Amino acid sequence: MDFSTKKAQPETVKTACVVVPAFRNGKLSEAAKRLDRHTRGQLTRALKNSEFNGAPGTTLMLFDVTGIDAPRVLVIGAGKNGELDVADFRKAIQGVLRRLCNAGIGDATLFVSEIKVSDRDEQWLATQIATLGIEAAYRFEVMKSEADKNKSKPLRRLILGTGSTPHRRQQAALARGRAIGQGLNLARDLGNLPPNVCTPDYLARRAREMGRLNRLRVNVLDVADMEKLKMGALLAVARGSRQPAKLISIEHRGGPAKQKPVVLVGKGVTFDTGGISLKPSGEMDEMKYDMSGAGSVFGTMYAVSAMKLPLNVIGLIPATENMPDGQATRPGDIVTSMSRQTIEILNTDAEGRLILCDALTYAERYDPAAVIDIATLTGACVIALGKVATGLFSPDDKLAEEILDAGENTWDRAWRMPVWDDYQEQLKSNFADVANIGGRPAGSVTAACFLARFAKKFRWAHLDIAGTAWKSGKDKGSTGRPVPLLTQFLMNRAGW
Ligand code: BES
Ligand code: MN
Ligand code: ZN
């Protein structure tokens, strides 16, 4: 989909659909008033005879309007007077996009400059519109047969219409929003792919392909390499699977050669059965999303390379399945991690932290400016924060603040939880340096505290996306979160 800005008037713009705001009580925006004048009051009449009330998210489509050049007018609800908060603004734009996509309209021109969001500038609005546009046009149909594919014409082009010459910064803001949206959709695609397709090897191939297309340096370590590195924890998870594990690195060197990189580590469990500590079978299919952390790293690496962000960023993805098998790790097994700490594996379903701890130790070699790991790590995080906020864990106030800010900016929000040493008590093992589970209380915190033991040599934060990475129920599917948060975090770091 492409995005552009254009100097135009709503009544004469050549477009399949012209979009204008209206407010509560049937009040028209200036752009809508112009259309109303040129159509001898058709908008006013249509609004009067409809249930449209100006609430954000509601729309009214008019066909066959005479007196103007566009064949369709879409009126969008913009609240009392067009001053919206972020949530309502997103609702309003999503309402428009849903309508455009469902109606199979190929291109639309939006005259929405009368919509304001407090504390956000025009560029922010443009970036949001582009990301939401790409997100709304998403379909996951690669696994459907031809007959079952949605054949409606896709939305191809969104234009921001303005009365005066548009600023070049608007175009740049749209391009960034587009890159974020595409990164988001890449993460969604990887999450939605079935676990028989999206294996560790598949992820490695996709990384190599992305490397070729986007000039990223990609490297893949296989099991023998990981054995040499003594990644005993990661390999303990991989043992039960016929699919060989991979450790994938993706490097975007956009900054000066000497600049320390930000390292993003994404949990890439392509299917989590629980291993010998087998999960109950209900909804086990959802454990294909257990590589969503990895997916978000793919998406973010895509976005930063597409926008040529002047920053060094490295994506690191430990990828494996977690399967039960005669060779699988048993509850009670003690393994030695790459950091040399020994771990008593009391529950093989707490596998995410086992693959991440070795990846974190591996990250030391990049001398990172900061490391953020992203993982669908605990069911407890879903209980604590639901599907709204990502769990943020970091002993570093400054880094935590940066991450919270980026989430607030993009509306891909996180909420901070403690990683106090007091919780380390729960991870004590009678037989090894540490146990891999800490009991039911504060399950997402003890998981983070486990990781903290392997993240002492750099600034570090952990994002638990078990709740936010996908939706269940009838709209089941990957959300692509937290690609917007991560990309914005990196953009802020680059001074953008
Ligand atoms: N991938 C799961 C976490 C998860 C659970 C994500 C539900 C999304 C929804 C993780 O590997 C896991 O199984 N965690 C266990 C940890 C426990 C054994 C300490 C959990 O949360 O139950
Ligand atoms: Mn698990
Ligand atoms: Zn898992």
Image (cartoon, grey):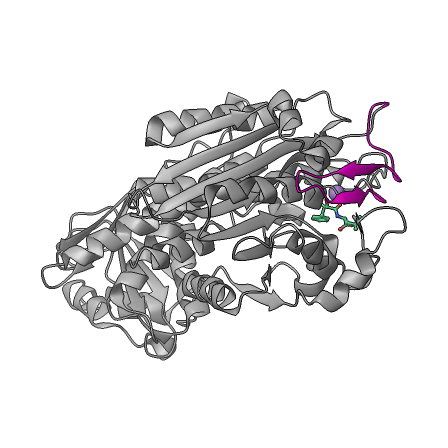
With 154 as the anchor, is 267 left or right in this view? Answer: right
Residue 417 is a magenta residue: no
With 198 as the anchor, is 264 left or right in this view? Answer: left
Front position in the image: 295 or 22:
295
With 230 as the anchor, is 252 left or right in this view? Answer: left
x, y percent for residue 299: 45, 41
Front position in the image: 265 or 290:
265
* Number of numbered discs on residues: 0
Residue positioned 73% across, 45% down in the render: 341
State which quarter of the image contains the N terminus: top left
Magenta stretch: dominant secondary structure = loop
With 204 as the anchor, is 342 left or right in this view? Answer: right
x, y percent for residue 276: 85, 34
- Is residue 392 at least partly visible in the picture? yes
- Is residue 292 at least partly visible in the picture? no
x, y percent for residue 72: 27, 52
When asked about the image quadrant of residue 303, the answer is: top left
State which quarter of the image contains the C terminus: bottom left
Q: Residue furthest front?
A: 340
x, y percent for residue 430: 90, 51
Residue positioned 78% across, 26% down in the render: 240
Residue positioned 82% across, 32% down in the render: 329
Q: In this view, does 302 lie above or below 72?
A: above
Front position in the image: 340 or 455:
340
Residue positioned 10% across, 63% down in the render: 164
When asked about the image quadrant of residue 390, the answer is: bottom right
Look at the image and give the residue range highlighted in magenta.
326-347
Q: In which quarter of the image is ligand 3?
A: top right
